[in-house]
Image (cartoon, rainbow, N blue to C red):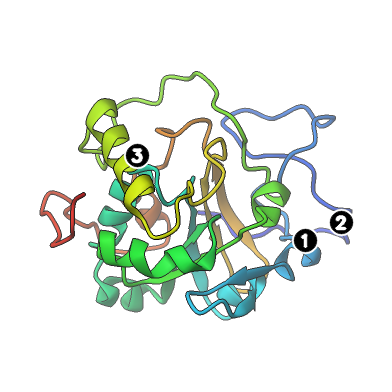
Amino acid sequence: MQGAVAEPALAPVTRQVSGRAAPAAVPSGPERGQPLAAAVAELPVLDASGRQVPFGALFRERRAVVVFVRHFLCYICKEYVEDLAKIPKSFLQEADVTLIVIGQSSYHHIEPFCKLTGYSHEIYVDPEREIYKKLGMKRGEEIAASGKSPHIKSNILSGSIRSLWRAVTGPLFDFQGDPAQQGGTLILGPGNNIHFIHCDKNRLDHKPINSVLQLVGVQHVDFTSRPSVIHV
């Protein structure tokens, strides 16, 4: 893993990291080795009580793995976060790393989502998707071979039915975010250093969790055991 490269003062970053160099003329998100723009670090996220926190404050003091999810009703996001929930806090503490999930719903949905998935690490929301946009997170799905995810257990039919059932039976009938929004994974901090960035091309294009943990020196996690969570 490489740290941020010392560079002169930069204009707002406009390129997205991928396996190949992106055309410089195409505006998108930042790339590894560039600092996160101060304007992005200052954008607020909301915690479960609705309190605003500057995005950059989440990783000012230590490295953080920051996972942006599509939306809280997405069964793929739910099952991915169920596996994030299995990461022992002691593993993160040993590596001095913070794990953060960011969604794009109202903050009212945070507590039910955590109860549903068993997730107890840090979680916030960006309801206006301002940070998603600034980081170049894709809206819409690109057809690409993403392979079979080790974190997704449901098939598309059963998963979609469960998502719809949660939507219509929840206290607030909404999709808990923009259904077309894609997510991504970053390793940030301390400060505004960007060490790694992956923007998902589609709902199955998330990074395998252990491959990200390896980059920050966190122990390998066995995801085969199932957590005690409510399946609806």
What's the amino acid at mark 2? Leu
Q: Which class describes the residues within 10 Å of circle 3: few (<14), some (14-19), or many (20+)?
A: some
What's the amino acid at mark 3? Leu
x and y percent of residue 188 in the render? Answer: 57, 63
Does residue 185 sit above or below 98 in this rendering? Answer: above
Q: Which mark is residue 37?
A: 1
Does residue 45 sit above or below 71 in this rendering? Answer: below
What's the amino acid at mark 1? Ala
Q: Which residue is drawn at 32% across and 51% down?
A: 169
> Which residue is the extreme one toward the left?
225
Does residue 138 sit above or below 95 in this rendering? Answer: above
Q: Which residue is drawn at 47% across and 48% down?
A: 71
**First in residue order: circle 2 vs circle 1:** 2
Q: Which of 3 and 67 is in front in this view?
A: 67
Residue 1 appears left or right of 91: right
Can you identify the residue that label 3 sits on?
A: 164
**Secondary structure found at label 2:** loop
